[in-house]
Amino acid sequence: MTILIDDPMWPAHGRLWSHLISDSDLDELHAFAATHGIPRRGFDRDHYDVPDEAHQRLVDGGAVPVDGHTLVRALIASGLRVTERERRGL
């Protein structure tokens, strides 16, 4: 089980954001996020959105930094990925 984080490059709300995922288990992801002060409201079905200022703290806490493509491939391979179609309820 590994927690992965991509670079903070996604703009929203006046700051940059990263995505935090687990490569195998949402319970593991929730526990990691809670341990490192990431609120549950940051969870978006299959990942956490985390502000850029939390990135290094999460890496120091054990999250593995990867590029965005690697993160998405790992999420898909985990079987945890929620597709756009599923998000729209189709």
Image: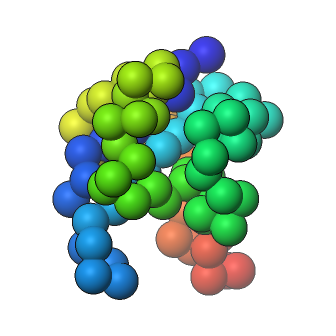
**Observer-nearest residue: 67 or 33?**
33
In the orientation shown, which residue stands out farthest toward the top? Answer: 1
Q: Quadrant of residue 5?
A: top left
Q: Total number of numbered labels?
A: 0
In the orientation shown, which residue stands out farthest toward the right? Answer: 27
Q: Say which residue appears at 74% left-offset and 34% top-offset.
A: 31
Provide residue 61's location: percent of width, then percent of height: 49, 24
Q: Does residue 14 appear in the picture of this structure?
A: yes
Q: Say which residue appears at 34% left-offset and 61% top-offset.
A: 17
Whether 23 is drawn above or below 81: the answer is above
**Observer-nearest residue: 36 or 73?**
36
Q: Quadrant of residue 41?
A: bottom right
Which quadrant of the figure contains the C terminus? bottom right
Provide residue 54's location: percent of width, then percent of height: 40, 48
**Observer-nearest residue: 63 or 61?**
61
Which quadrant of the figure contains the N terminus? top right
Whether 30 is drawn above or below 40: the answer is above
Whether 17 is drawn above or below 20: the answer is below
What's the coloring here?
rainbow
Q: Does residue 71 appear in the picture of this structure?
A: no
Q: Is residue 56 left or right of residue 85?
A: left
Provide residue 56's location: percent of width, then percent of height: 32, 36
Q: Say which residue appears at 40% left-offset and 23% top-offset.
A: 60
Q: Quadrant of residue 2?
A: top right
